[in-house]
Amino acid sequence: MIDPAMQQFEWSVRALAQPAAVQLRLYPSFVEVADELALEFEEHLQRIDVDQLPPAQRDAVRALDQALEEMSGPAHAELWEVSALDVAPEWTRLRELASQVIAAMDWSREPPPIDRGALYVGSDTRALHG
């Protein structure tokens, strides 16, 4: 049986590896998709012990984490706009790095399930309740 923390981490990496059009379909319309992709990855990364992974897997995960870190902060605000998902070379690089993690872990390249157990908070509560 797969560890639930590792399952969630896998899904977050698989989401990062998808083309922008697929990434947009993975989240409700009121969610800031670029932010959510990074937040989910970071949240689930904290729940696994990267140091216990074999070196190739550990290095791939750390490279992806480092690339996200380099995109963070006010100086890179434009990278977190939804339009950047499709046009920014930084997002192309993230997809490549996420694909490297997938290959190192021998995971499916398919998009993660839409219902991953996440709870999203939006300004339009009608979207949350149907």
Image (cartoon, rainbow, N blue to C red):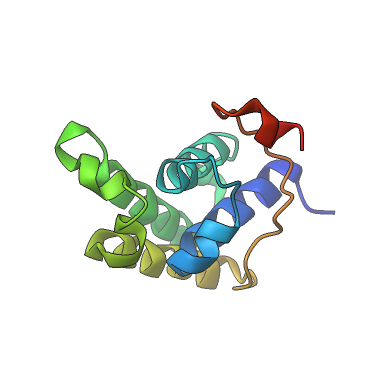
Q: Nearer the viewer, residue 83 or 80?
A: 83
Q: Nearer the viewer, residue 71 or 36?
A: 36
**Residue ID at (19%, 42%):** 76
Residue 59, x across and y down, in percent: 39, 57
Looking at the image, can residue 66 be seen? no
Residue 57, x across and y down, in percent: 49, 60
Q: Residue furthest left?
A: 75
Residue 3, x across and y down, in percent: 75, 46
Q: Quadrant of residue 55?
A: bottom left
Seen in the picture, residue 114 relative to 70 is either above or below; the reply is below
Q: Residue furthest right?
A: 1
Seen in the picture, residue 125 relative to 92 is either above or below; the reply is above
**Residue ID at (37%, 51%):** 82
Q: Quadrant of the C terminus?
A: top right
Q: Quadrant of the N terminus?
A: bottom right
Seen in the picture, residue 129 relative to 12 is either above or below; the reply is above
Q: Nearer the viewer, residue 90 or 79?
A: 79
Residue 96, x across and y down, in percent: 38, 70
**Residue ID at (37%, 47%):** 65
Seen in the picture, residue 125 relative to 55 is either above or below; the reply is above
